[in-house]
């Protein structure tokens, strides 16, 4: 960009800014970290749900660990399309910070030598800028920078937003304007990027940003997570996938080597401008978590040995580092405590010299009545003695026949009498038995009623427990009234499940119409009984007594009632059930599909969860919604393997709740033969139009949705059948 163009453009920005009212941040610094960087993203919201059902709480900026020397505030985006297409930033009150506190805390981090930058985009932000928006977008970035004291901007566009409209030209042009604006003041406005690494191939979607900002961007921190089987091909080892934990060191080394040298089909990012992006823990991303940090230490050492050390590490996210897992156990800043010292000193944490090390003894869960080998996966090594696995001593016992927590202690001693001792918690768990056929019922006086007819109980470990069911309470079918039965079952783990069942015996030939209630709301078509008559509402009403509204009023008489308004059927307890649960399902290409039918007699909040044999949530196996009476629920379980799974449904209506549990087995049938069709196979990155049909990897035909979803069809993140969000872009035919 020549000087004349820059001058004219900046004058245009100045004119745009004169129409805005804001107070500049008191801090005049624009901090640029020197040497290694540890970049962490900060949530501008509260309580994020993790991939393993953990929680990421809100936190203040000043609470971030000092070893995060770059904090990326997430996110700058379009909050409401009615306000225009220029992204902006609004501080979420859920963070617990006021605007002034937020500004003060950015200044505090700046005073500590730490940069605070603004991240643009995120997974759910579909930014769509058009040619001609360059000046307006640059003006908004400058306004936010001057108001809050930001030190730069991170391009964090994902999925369809990467190449939506004119983003690939407008955003780099605007950032060049911003960078030049602050260069005039003797400051360096940081420009960084966080592309998902498959977009960094020679023809990848992020190349226009990197090319247009060459000489302007400060570093790039690619996301090496969430991409599952994507990876890099290397002569010799072959394909190394991002989610292959056994080859994690090789993946880190070879993908970084490919980028810093522009080989193996990837673009070039200089080693001192490459920051390696990894998830904080298993809740922060679907894949990519580094189980053994030594893999990263070793890979970085190999790069440093070839005189190409990387700039540092990035993580999603700071909030997840202080979050909790599904059981409520804190992650305790384990990411920053592990990688912070390494990056800032470029040496891995020091292992106490002379002592042997034990690996593979993380806390674990074991299903009741299964086998458990305390030495499975456990190894011991010593620098001088080598492999000491056979010398490990284990004290304690795990009885898988009894549910509970057990503690094992592992110890090993080397030839110099240096001993290492480490404890391990093993939890033996059991699924609860489940009932079927205990729904509430209404019968007529004189009907035959068998309390065990159609009732059964099953357990994951014990199988059919129907013969062990105990029932308390009686139903006298000769006398009208409401009767309560209590069903109880206890499994071999001594876990007892009890359910209540209400059976109403009515003395009329039909089920009585509900009585009119003065405080209830009725809509057109609702029928009530009152003073021996049935009445139908003509429109919405509340408090209008049937029989008093006249010929043209809201209530119309539709007949007599056998209940007479005096012997009306008691209001039934809330009932809900989930049917359509098969005992076996087939896995195709790592995916299993469940079609469930929910029915209830009242509106309720419904939550359904599918968990694996270890008790962990299954991707795609969660449903939460408000349901009036009935609903067909389709679940697509992703990345599943052949095993036994459990399903739990909890429905809540007012103060009543119903819980139902079931078990099923997934069987792997491999891939399926595709149907005979003219539809071409799906290709990630191809520009699809609304209505285009493709053949997906599951052997089914999918059709690209109409605008505004059409743009997502090209993204691998919306790949039909295989991605988590495919239904946002495609319709299965």
Image: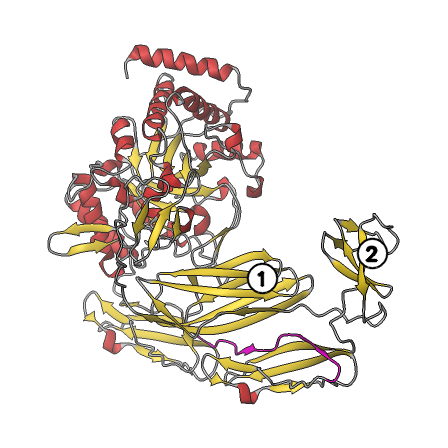
> In percent of the image, x 18 and y 67: which residue is there?
384
* Percent coordinates x, y for residue 304 in the rendering: 19, 44
Q: Percent x, y for residue 645?
A: 42, 71
**Few, some or many residues within 10 Å of mark 2 (<14, 14–19, 20+):** few
Quadrant of the image containing the N terminus: top left
Q: Circles 1 and 2: CB distance less than 8 Å?
A: no
Point out the stretch of residues depicted in magenta: 425-446
Q: Using the image, determine if residue 485 lies above or below residue 74.
A: below
Relative to residue 395, is residue 99 depicted above or below?
A: above
Q: In this orientation, which residue lies closer to the viewer: 324 or 448?
A: 448
Which residue is rendered at x = 63% and y = 77% of the image? 499
Left-right relation of 252 to 400: left
Residue 606: which quarter of the image?
bottom right
Task: Pick whichever, 703 or 366, lies toward us.
Answer: 703
The answer to whether residue 394 of the structure is visible from this angle is yes
Quickly name the residue at label 2.
Answer: 518
| Residue 501 place in picture, x, y as percent | 66, 77
Q: Earlier in the sequence, mark 1 or mark 2?
A: 2
Residue 683: numbered disc: none
Count neighbours of disc 1 (C-alpha within 10 A) and say few if under 14, some if 14 to 19, many if 20 or more. Answer: some
534 in the magenta segment: no
Q: Is residue 177 left or right of residue 110?
A: left
Find disc 1 in the rendering and name its residue: 630
- Calculate the distance from the C-alpha at mark 1 to the C-alpha at mark 2: 27 Å
Secondary structure found at label 1: strand
Q: Secondary structure at mark 2?
A: loop
Which quadrant would residue 9 be assigned to in this image? top left
Residue at the left extreme?
A: 236
In x, y percent, where is residue 512?
76, 69
Res 301 seen here: no
Count numbered badges in the picture.
2
Q: Quadrant of the C terminus?
A: bottom left
């Amino acid at each position: 960009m020549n000087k004349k163009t820059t001058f004219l453009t900046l004058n245009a920005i100045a004119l745009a800014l004169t129409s805005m009212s804001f107070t500049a941040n008191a801090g005049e610094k624009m901090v640029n970290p020197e040497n290694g960087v540890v970049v962490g993203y900060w949530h501008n919201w509260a309580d994020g749900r993790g991939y393993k059902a953990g929680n990421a709480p809100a936190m203040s900026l000043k609470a971030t660990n000092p070893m995060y020397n770059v904090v990326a505030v997430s996110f700058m985006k379009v909050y409401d399309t009615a306000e225009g297409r220029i992204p902006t930033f609004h501080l979420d009150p859920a963070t617990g910070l006021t605007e002034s506190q937020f500004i003060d805390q950015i200044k505090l981090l700046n005073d500590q030598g730490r940069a605070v930058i603004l991240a643009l985009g995120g997974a759910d932000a579909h930014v769509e800028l058009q040619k001609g928006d360059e000046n307006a977008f640059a003006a908004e970035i400058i306004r936010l920078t001057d108001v809050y004291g930001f030190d730069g901007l991170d391009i964090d566009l994902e999925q369809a937003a990467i190449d939506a409209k004119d983003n690939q030209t407008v955003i780099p042009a605007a950032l060049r304007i911003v960078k030049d604006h602050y260069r005039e003041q003797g400051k360096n406005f940081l420009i960084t990027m966080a592309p998902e690494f498959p977009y960094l191939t020679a023809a990848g979607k992020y190349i226009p940003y990197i090319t247009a900002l060459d000489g302007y961007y400060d570093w790039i921190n690619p996301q090496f997570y969430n991409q599952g089987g994507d990876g890099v091909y290397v002569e010799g080892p072959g394909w190394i996938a991002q989610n292959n934990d056994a080859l994690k060191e090789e993946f880190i080394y070879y993908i970084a080597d490919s980028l810093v040298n522009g080989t193996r089909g990837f673009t070039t990012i200089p080693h001192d401008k490459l920051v390696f992006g990894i998830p904080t823990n298993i809740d922060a991303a679907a894949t990519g978590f580094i189980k053994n940090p030594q893999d990263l230490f070793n890979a970085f050492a190999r790069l440093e040995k070839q005189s190409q050390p990387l700039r540092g590490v990035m993580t999603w996210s700071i909030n997840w580092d202080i979050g909790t897992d599904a059981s409520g156990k804190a992650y305790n800043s384990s990411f920053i405590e592990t990688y912070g010292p390494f990056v800032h000193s470029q040496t891995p944490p020091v292992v106490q010299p002379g002592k042997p090390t034990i690996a593979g003894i993380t806390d674990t869960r074991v299903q009741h009545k299964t086998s458990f080998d305390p030495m499975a996966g456990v190894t011991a090594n010593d620098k001088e003695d080598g492999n000491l696995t056979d010398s490990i001593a284990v004290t304690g016992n795990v009885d898988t026949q009894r549910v509970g927590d057990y503690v094992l202690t592992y110890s090993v001693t080397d030839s110099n009498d240096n001993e290492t001792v480490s404890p391990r918690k093993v939890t033996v768990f059991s699924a609860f038995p489940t009932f079927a056929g205990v729904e509430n019922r209404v019968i007529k006086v004189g009907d035959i009623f068998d309390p065990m007819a159609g009732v059964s109980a099953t357990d994951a470990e014990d199988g059919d427990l129907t013969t062990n069911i105990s029932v308390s309470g009686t139903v006298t079918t000769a006398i009208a009234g409401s009767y309560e039965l209590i069903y109880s079952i206890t499994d071999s783990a001594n876990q007892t499940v009890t359910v209540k069942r209400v059976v109403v015996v009515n003395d009329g030939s039909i089920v009585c119409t509900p009585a009119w209630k003065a405080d209830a709301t009725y809509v057109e078509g609702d029928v009530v009984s009152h003073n021996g008559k049935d009445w139908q509402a003509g429109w919405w009403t509340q408090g209008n007594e049937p029989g008093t509204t006249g010929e043209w009023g809201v209530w119309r008489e539709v007949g007599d009632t056998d209940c007479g308004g005096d012997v009306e059927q008691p209001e039934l307890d809330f009932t809900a059930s989930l049917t359509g649960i098969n005992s076996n399902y087939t896995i195709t290409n790592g995916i299993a599909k469940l079609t469930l039918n929910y029915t209830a007699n009242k509106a309720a909040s419904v939550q359904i969860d599918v968990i694996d044999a270890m008790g962990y949530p299954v991707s795609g196996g969660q449903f939460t919604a408000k349901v009036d009476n009935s609903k067909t629920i389709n679940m697509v379980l992703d990345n599943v393997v052949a095993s036994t799974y459990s399903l739990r449904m909890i429905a809540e209506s007012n103060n009543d709740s119903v819980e139902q549990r079931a078990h099923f087995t997934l069987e792997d049938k491999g891939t399926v033969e595709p149907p005979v069709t003219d539809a071409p196979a799906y290709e990630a990155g191809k520009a699809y139009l609304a209505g285009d049909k493709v053949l997906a990897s599951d052997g089914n035909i999918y059709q690209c949705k109409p605008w505004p979803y059409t743009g997502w069809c090209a993204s691998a993140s919306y790949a039909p059948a295989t991605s988590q969000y495919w239904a946002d872009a495609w319709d299965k035919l």
